[in-house]
Image (cartoon, rainbow, N blue to C red):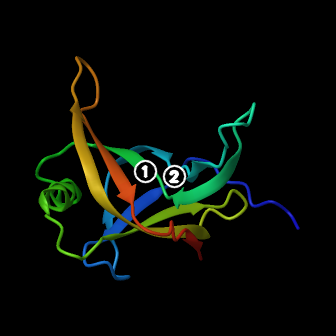
Amino acid sequence: MAIGKRIGNNITISVDTAGGSSFTEIGYLVSVEGGELTRTDVNVSLLADTYNSYLPGARESGEFGFVVALDPNESGNQTLVTLYNRDATGTVPNWKIGYPTVANSTATITETFLGYVKSLGHTFGKDELIQRACTIKLTGEHGYTSS
């Protein structure tokens, strides 16, 4: 089986604010990072042990971050602010990442996951693109599903 190579062109981030599958793209993506899955450590050592012993504990789905060009009037930026200001309503947004294959730039692979907007930030610099950083806290099972 050949590996499907990916490059960082034409990557998209989309969200369904109601947690469903009607996604709206968050525009003007600059960069993406994160999505690290981790586990807690359970210390099962006894007082008589010379070395600590551990077992794997609960899984943590982690955080996912991205940066977009900041235009306060653009609907994607407004959606991020609305989601950040949303209190715990029981409805967790569903997010989707899309990225193309190298061999076929029209074929897109997608991954979806549930998470809430944990943080929003701004970056301003002389002669630089004004940007908004967003961190999504993934909830429950990471749910990375590809299609």
Q: Is residue 88 left or right of residue 22?
A: left
Residue 4: percent from the left, percent from the top?
75, 61
Labelled pair 1, 2 in contact (Cβ < 8 Å): yes
* Quadrant of the frame with the C terminus: bottom right
Using the image as rendered, state which of residue 15 and residue 137 is in the foreground: 137
Q: Is residue 20 above or below residue 110?
A: below
Q: Is residue 133 left or right of residue 84?
A: right
The residue shown at (25%, 78%) is 18
Residue 39: percent from the left, percent from the top?
58, 52
Neighbour tally class for label 2: few under 14, some 14-19, many 20 plus, Cα within 10 Å: some
Amino acid type assigned to the residue bearing label 1 in the image: Glu
Q: Is residue 81 above or below residue 95?
A: above
Amino acid type assigned to the residue bearing label 2 in the image: Gly
Q: Earlier in the sequence, mark 1 or mark 2?
A: 2
The residue shown at (88%, 68%) is 1
Q: Which residue is mark 2?
A: 35
Residue 41: percent from the left, percent from the top?
59, 48
Residue 60: percent from the left, percent from the top?
50, 56
Task: Determine whether the residue tagged by mark 1 lies in a helix, strand or loop.
Answer: strand
Task: Determine whether the residue tagged by mark 2 lies in a helix, strand or loop.
Answer: loop
Neighbour tally class for label 1: few under 14, some 14-19, many 20 plus, Cα within 10 Å: many
The residue shown at (17%, 73%) is 89
Query: Which quarter of the figure has residue 106?
Result: bottom right
Q: Is residue 54 left or right of residue 132?
A: right
Query: Which quarter of the figure has residue 96?
Result: bottom left
Q: Which residue is mark 1?
A: 63
The residue shown at (23%, 59%) is 76
What's the CA distance linking mark 1 and mark 2?
Answer: 6 Å
